[in-house]
Amino acid sequence: MKLSEHKDLKTAITELPVKEKDKLLLRLVAKDKVLTEHLHYKLLEDETDLEDRKEKIKTDVEEQIAELKKLNAKEALVKVRKMITSVNHFYKVTKDPVGEVELKLFILNAVPFDYKKSIFGYRDFMMLFSIYYIKTVAVTLNKFKKLHEDLQFDLSEDANHLLDKIYSSKLAGAAEASNLPKEIS
């Protein structure tokens, strides 16, 4: 049931006494972990906490990058997905589009492309890794383009470094097929 479909319910909720509304609100917030964390961030944290969150993600990524080089493509794909998921969670909590693009560019620039090939199994996980990686780059570049031009300028060096890295690797064909730009001006 959507609230927008029930205008009477919306009116009834707004007419509830404040004490009762507070109880209901607290019960609802407690059921959603992301909403709880978002409210904590919005109500109790400031800019330094935002920077701390970014630094924590960067530190976690740096620790995992050394491990990535020792893994096969399947294991690396799982780790990279978790890293990107942590940035998605960061965005859900902070609603900071600049931080999201900055962190994704950081991760995508740090991730290596060469992995051991698994001799067991029938799936080509290097191909799956490439598809996921290129798609993530495309989504990140679309979000990059929506940022203010001053912010784009600040992040353009990282974006161009990433595109350079892709087009000078074995992912160049997949990038071209996906219409990824060769550089951002």
Image (cartoon, rainbow, N blue to C red):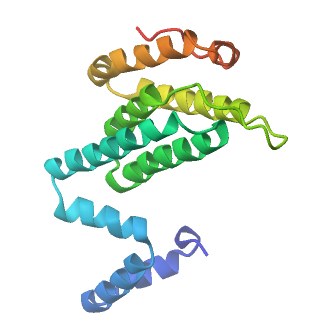
Residue at 64%, 36% (x, y): give it: 73
> Whole-percent x and y of residue 42?
24, 60
Q: Nearer the viewer, residue 11 or 178?
A: 178
Residue 135: x and y, percent? 61, 31
The answer to whether residue 96 is left or right of residue 176 is left
Residue 163 in percent (x, y) is at: 49, 15
Rendered view: 62 above or below 112: below
In the picture, which quadrant includes the C terminus? top left
In front here: 143 or 66? 66
> Which residue is rendered at x = 31% and y = 91% of the image?
20
| Residue 96 shows in the view | no
Q: Quadrant of the N terminus?
A: bottom right
Seen as rendered, the residue at the extreme right is 122
Q: Quick check: 106 left or right of 132?
A: left
Q: Position of residue 14 (x, y in %)?
A: 36, 80
What residue lies at 53% left-to-right and 72% top-to-bottom? 3
Quadrant assignment, res 115: top right
State the count of labels.
0
Examine the rendered structure and indicate whether residue 40 appears above or below residue 26. Answer: above
Residue 174: in sight, yes or no?
A: yes
- Figure check: 151 above or below 89: above
In this view, the residue in front, 105 or 142, is: 105
Picture quarter containing residue 32? bottom left
